[in-house]
Every structure is written in structure tokens, then in C-alpha cells.
Image (cartoon, helix red, strand yellow):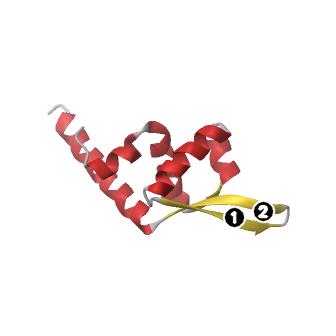
């Protein structure tokens, strides 16, 4: 599948799962993503950093009753890029589907 260069970052399986989860839920705690996607702390942190550097997600600290927590939120650029990625993926699947 030939993807535009800005979408190849999303195509990596772990980053694709993170983006898909954030696309659906928009704003999620670090621990929820880590636990539900069964990632290690280091794995999530490194992939999230790549997505944040690309402008697809934002990291923020939020106050909760039990203290501060790290949260990830998909950006508008992330939403747009993920939607484009999904269109490209659908186009690819349509091309390989037997007639």
C-alpha cells in the first residue's frame, strides 16, 4: 500500500491502534490506553511521542481526585490525517478485493 509520507507514521501497528482508540474516544488517560491496548509504559510513551511530534496528538496533565494523570487527546490535524488514512486503506482494500 502506497501511503503519502505524512501517513506512514500512522501505519505502524501500535501507532495505528493508539490513533484508532483516540479517534473513537478523543481524550483518554495514559493508563487506560496502556492497559486496554496492552502496551508497556516505554512502548506507549515512545509511540505517543512520535505522534505528538507529528502534531496528531497532545499530551496534557489533568488533576483528578487521586492526583495528576497524563492524558492524550487527538488533535484536529490527527483527526484529519486519520480520516485520510482510513480512506487510503479502504481504497487499497477495494483494489485487492477479488471481483
Residue drawn at x 40%, y 47% is 10
Circle 2 SS class:
strand
Where is residue 89? Give x, y as percent: 29, 45
Residue 85 shows in the view: yes
Q: CA distance from mark 2 to mark 1?
A: 6 Å
Q: Which residue is mark 1?
A: 61
Q: For residue 60, what is the image quadrant?
A: bottom right
x, y percentage for residue 13? Answer: 45, 37
Which residue corresponds to mark 2?
68
Res 55 quadrant in image: bottom left
Q: Residue 77 at what x, y percent from top left?
A: 40, 65
User: How crowded is the residue under tag 1: few (<14 C-alpha within 10 Å), some, or many (20+)?
Assistant: few
Q: State the image coordinates of residue 1 (x, y, percent, origin top left).
A: 24, 37
Q: Are marks 2 and 1 in contact (CB under 8 Å)?
A: yes
Front residue of 52 and 17: 52
Judged left or right of residue 19, residue 66 is right
Q: Tell whether 27 sits left or right of 84.
A: right
Q: Which mark is residue 20?
A: none
- Relative depth, front residue between 94 and 55: 55
- Is 13 left or right of 34, judged from the image as shown? left
Amino acid at each position: 500500500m502506497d501511503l503519502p509520507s505524512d501517513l506512514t507514521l500512522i501505519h505502524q501497528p501500535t501507532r495505528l491502534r493508539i490513533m484508532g482508540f483516540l479517534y473513537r474516544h478523543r481524550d483518554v488517560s495514559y493508563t487506560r490506553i496502556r492497559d486496554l491496548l496492552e502496551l508497556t509504559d516505554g512502548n506507549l510513551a515512545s509511540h505517543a511521542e512520535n505522534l505528538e511530534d507529528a502534531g496528531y496528538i497532545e499530551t496534557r496533565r489533568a488533576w483528578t481526585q487521586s492526583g495528576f494523570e497524563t492524558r492524550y487527546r487527538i488533535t484536529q490535524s490527527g483527526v484529519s490525517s486519520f480520516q485520510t488514512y482510513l480512506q487510503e486503506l479502504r481504497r487499497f482494500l477495494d483494489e485487492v478485493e477479488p471481483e
